[in-house]
Image: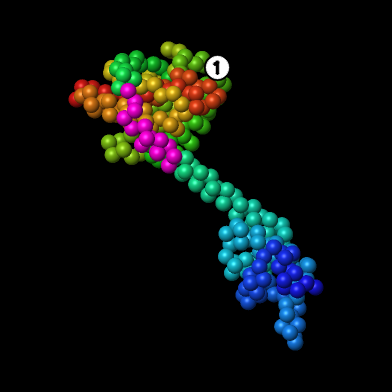
Amino acid sequence: MFSIGEFAVLGRLSVRMLRHYDAIGLLRPARVDEFSGYRFYSATQLSRLNRIFALKDLGFSLEQVRGILDDQVGPAELRGMLRLRRAELEERVSADRARLARVEARLRLIESEGLMAVEEVVLKDVPGTRVAQMSAPIGGWGHEHIGPVLGPLFEELCARIERSGTRFAGPAVAHYLTNEAGEGSTVFAAIPVPAGTPASPDFEVTELPALPLAATVIHRGAVSEMEPAFQALGAWVEENGYRATGAPREVNLEVPADRDAWVTEIQLPVVRA
């Protein structure tokens, strides 16, 4: 048997916390001296203490911990519960990291306002081209909505095109369809294919229309960091007497393994205002 102080050292917690656990019925002493009132603990109780710590660290309240332990949950079931809660916490941490990345990107965007030279915007006509494409709905215009959809969509499209034996005829293009309210948006992953490529059951084959006039800009870096280029392009269009006539296109000119080295051309269809 160990005194409460000795057991506190072994269990790596305070005497005050052990007294609290005793008061709420979570971890009672193995024996209490009837004359002195001193509490004594057994080394076998460290097993229950380990479970208390694990459940607490995974976000369970002390009342929930007591219920779980008093129900005499077996090791296998307890491991399953802990793995499930661990997965929930990992998902929350991942979401928090993604949120932090978006905040940092927004700060960089604010810091870069007005730094992009207008000479970088080029007006040109974009010819139409035959493409194989697949589409999927997106819940918003931020990269957190588009990225998780568009990346897998392009991977699946490339795999289907390769299986069909069709040849790639140009850089991949992402384009969008949305209604006037800006809701119900759809993203298209498109890859140019040779003229005359027949229809396929695995993907849509269609003509991507020409853009008679497009304001374009080159973005160098990850596609998740394109917001400054989009905003600078929008400012240039307005300042130079144009207006947009549709959603932008993104042409992946260079896609090396290092995503920070990607080169993307943003094409915004415009007319004179």
Q: What colour-coding does the image apply?
A: rainbow
The kind of residue on which mark 1 rests is Gly
Residue matched to label 1? 165
Seen in the image, is 243 located left or right of residue 12?
Answer: left
Question: Is 32 situated above or below 89?
Answer: below
Seen in the image, is 176 located left or right of residue 162?
Answer: left
Residue at image point 57% right, 51% down: 89
Residue 147 painted magenta: no
Residue at image point 38% right, 27% down: 175
Identify which residue, 120 or 82, lies in the foreground.
120
Q: Is residue 204 visible?
A: no
Q: Which residues are magenta?
A: 103-117
Q: How busy is the neighbourhood of tag 1: few (under 14 within 10 Å), some, or many (20 plus)?
A: few
* Prevailing secondary structure class for the magenta stretch in the rendered image: helix
Identify which residue, 116 or 78, lies in the foreground.
116
Question: Is 214 situated above or below 31?
Answer: above
Q: Position of residue 1 (x, y in %)?
A: 80, 73
Q: Residue at the far bottom: name it.
A: 35
Please state, as top left, top right, bottom left or bottom right, where the C terminus lies in the image. Answer: top left
Question: Is 103 situated above or below 190?
Answer: below
Secondary element type, mark 1:
loop
Quadrant of res 114: top left
